[in-house]
Amino acid sequence: MEQYRHWLALKQVTGVGNVLFKRLLERFSSPGAIFSAPPLELASVEGLSDTAARAILSFRAFSEIDREFEKIRKAGCALVCLHDPEYPTLLAAIYDPPPLLYVKGTLPPMPHSMAVVGARQATPYGRKVTQHLCRGLVQQGMVIVSGFARGIDEVAHQSTLAAAGHTLAVLGCGVDRIYPPEHKQLYHDIADRGALLSEFDLGTAPEPHHFPQRNRIISGLSLGCVVVEAAERSGALITARHALEQGREVFAVPGPIFSPSSAGSNRLIQSGAKLVTDTADILNEVQYAASQEKSEAPPPPEIPLDEAEAVLCRFLSSEPKQIDQIIGESGQTAASVSGLLLILELKGVIEKSQGQFYARK
C-alpha cells in the first residue's frame, strides 16, 4: 500500500482534478516527484493554479492517508493506479481517466469488454433482450461492464454471472457502500466473480452528481456501449455520449414506438447509433473497428540522422545506385561516401546489394 501514499495524497489536493493529475504525471512521472518538484517547475504546468501549486507544496495531511489505508484494509478492497499493469488499458486512454481505482474483487483480463446499460424502469422486453445479448457476448469471451443500477444494469450483471462470465460494476459511491441496498447479494456475487470499481473514496455516499461522472468510466472501460432501453432523459444516454466522445462504438436496441422506455434508444438509432437485433450485430462491428485500427497502424519511428547522413540520403532512392554514381552526384570524396554509406547501412536506412549498389529501404 505504501506505493500509493503520494497517489492518494495528490488526489486529496483541492484544485487537482483528473485531467490535471494526468498532466502532472506526464511532466514529473510520479506523484512522489510532483510533491518534491521545485516550485518554479510546478508553477509552469499548464492549468495548475497558484493555489493548487501551494497546496501541493504544503501538503502535510499524511495521517489522513494512513486512515484511508486502514479503511481499505478493513473493507477488503485494493487500489489500482494509472501506472499499474493491471489498470485497464482502454480506460487509461480516455481524456480524464481516474488516477486511482478502488477495486472490490479481482479485475479480469480485459482484451474485450462491452458496456450494457439502460433504463432503471426496465420492461419485460428490455430484460429479455439484455439476458439474450449478455449471454451471447459472454460466449464470445466478452467482459460485461455496467453501472450496478436497478433495471437493465442489474439484469446485465446477473445474466453475465449466470452465463459464467466476468462482469465489472462501476459505482457512483465508495466500493464499501452497497447501493441500491437491495443489491446486497448481487454485490457479493460480483465481488466473488468479477469486480466492483469506483474512483470515489471509501465511505462516499451515492450523491446524484456522482452517477454522470461514473458513466464515463463505464464507457471508458469498454470497446462499445449497448443501450437496451432508455427514456428521453436517461443516464444511459449520458453513457452513450461519453462513448462517442471517447471514440467508442455506440449500439442501441430498437423498442416499441409507444414505449417511453424506448424513446431514448430509438432516438439514438435515428442519430446514427448502430441498431442491434442480435449479438452478431455488436461483434461484427467491433471486429470491423479492430481490423480498421490494425490497418491504420502508425508508421515506424524515423531513424535520427546527422546532417552529413541526411545530405547523402538525398542522392539515394528505392532504385539501387552504384557507389561511383553516388560519389559523382554528391560531389563528395570516395572515402567520405563509403564511410557514410556504411553508417546508413548499419542504421538500417539503406540496403547494399552485390556490385556495391545501394538503395533506400
Image (cartoon, rainbow, N blue to C red):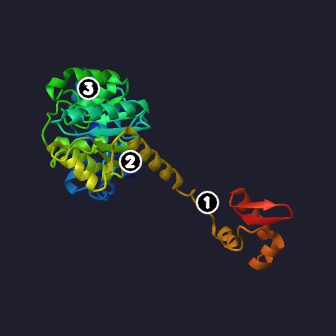
| Amino acid under disc 2 | Ala
* Label 2: how many Cα within 10 Å (few below 14, some 14–19, many 20+): few
Label 3, on which residue? 72
Label 2, on which residue? 93
Of tags 3 and 2, the one toward the viewer is: 2
| 154, 357: nearer the viewer | 154
Q: Which circle's residue, 1 or 2, is located before the other in the chain? A: 2
Q: Which circle's residue, 1 or 3, is located before the other in the chain? A: 3
Seen in the picture, residue 64 relative to 270 is either above or below; the reply is: above
What distance separates the C-alpha of mark 1 from that of mark 2?
27 Å
| Amino acid under disc 3 | Ile
Q: Position of residue 94 (x, y in %)?
A: 34, 49
What distance separates the C-alpha of mark 3 from that of mark 2?
26 Å
Which image quarter is the C terminus in?
bottom right
Q: Is 186 positioned to the left or the right of 352 in the image?
A: left
| 128, 244: nearer the viewer | 128
Q: Position of residue 254 (x, y in %)?
A: 26, 45
| Amino acid under disc 1 | Ile
Label 1, on which residue? 303
Of tags 1 and 2, the one toward the viewer is: 2
Seen in the picture, residue 110 relative to 243 is either above or below; the reply is: above
* Label 1: how many Cα within 10 Å (few below 14, some 14–19, many 20+): few
| 126, 349: nearer the viewer | 126
Which image quarter is the N terminus in?
top left
Q: Position of residue 248 (x, y in %)?
A: 36, 49
